[in-house]
Amino acid sequence: MPIQLEDNIKCPKLFFIYITSKVNNMYKRIIIRATFTLCMALFANESFAQGPNNSGTYYQKADGQKGSSLKTALADIISNHTTISYDGLLDAYKTTDKRSDGKVWDMYSNTTNFTFDKDKAGNYKKEGDVYNREHSVPQSWFSKASPMKSDLVHVVPTDGYVNNRRGNYPFGETNGEKYQSNNGFSKLGASTISGYSGIVFEPNDIYKGDFARIYFYMATCYENKISGWSGDMFNKTKYPAFKTWALEMLLKWSKEDPVSQKEIDRNKGVYQLQKNRNPFVDYPGLEEYIWGSKKDVAFSYDQYDAPTLIELPVQDINITDVYTITGIKVRSKVDKSHATENLKPGIYIINRKKVIVNP
């Protein structure tokens, strides 16, 4: 006999109870088995369709989108976040920006060894005195407005003196004729990027991708606010959001300095505290789906096809130097395949890449 199902029957338990009350024993086992198979297939589809880095279904609503529509779909997801207080950032850094040796992870200098709390946000006369809160996107560009002012994704701890030398200059590439931090790690001077001739601040190669992905996040998360921003890198539109010279440079930086474990760990910490994620860290090369070579390809949150990333050129692919994260050379001209052998646990720079040596 035909079976009519009510709308409020839910799979699988209630459905089993309902259906077994409607049919005779002769068909009970057949129907239960078929129903169980169907429900388990549906359950598996929902349960195992997961994004990277334990993100689950966080990005599911962006599935199938591309180009500017993908950017807007991601904005709808990541803009709904907790606002951390400006003072609260200094405590947050203990979760998001702690090196393996327990010191502050500074992306503007490679000679600092700041201790949390003890060395924070005080007076400084030189590089290495204190660390403070650096707005990767200068806060003057968005009039110090909330929630951008204290967004943990882009406000990072850096050396106070180097931060001050950067001021609110845009990121770029330069010969550093105006200023260079210790070891020439960060530089300030006239732009050498085609399309922009102003003064720029250049972060070190090992962090250029980090900052590029931060800028992609900011342009996405705050696409509805960006029309009111100033600064020479943005063009006041939701899409593409960046001026051509800046976008081309950031896309290049992101390719040349791919996502590192440091960024993945920081993204996890940000999510823990601020309750949102940087999709450009979770999905390496995602920017290509919005602004680059794959902007006509639909995004899949659980079957993501990462674009091929290029490696930075080195003089000899088999020979390398090894540095600590603070810039101290610990090995010189060693065979690349043995570069990490017998190193103490920690974070090292090898071939201009961040490498983590586990215990």
Image (cartoon, grey):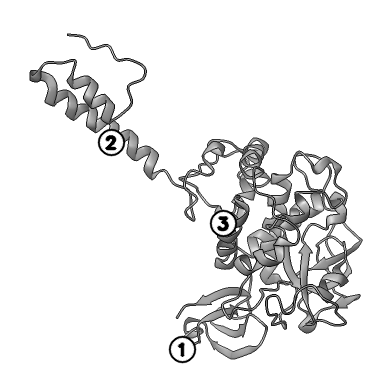
Residue 206 placement (x, y as % from top left): 67, 71
First in residue order: circle 3 vs circle 2? 2
Residue tagged by mark 1? Answer: 342
> Disc 3 marks which amino acid?
Gln
Q: Earlier in the sequence, mark 2 or mark 1?
A: 2
Which one is in front, 232 or 148?
148
Question: In front: 100, or 231?
Answer: 100
The amino acid pointed to by label 2 is Met
Q: Residue extending furthest top?
A: 1
Can residue 284 be spotted in the picture?
no
Residue 259, percent from left and from top: 59, 62
Of badges 3 and 2, the one in the foreground is 3
| Residue position for label 3 | 272
Q: Residue at x 77, y 60 (%)?
A: 136
The residue that mark 2 highlights is 40
Q: Are marks 2 and 1 in contact (CB under 8 Å)?
A: no
Q: Indicate which label's residue lies in the foreground, 2 or 1.
A: 2
Q: Real-space Cα distance between discs 3 and 2?
A: 32 Å
In the rendered image, the quadrant that contains the C terminus is bottom left
Relative side of 3 to 175, left or right: left
Front one among 15 and 289: 15
Q: Position of residue 45 (x, y in %)?
A: 36, 38
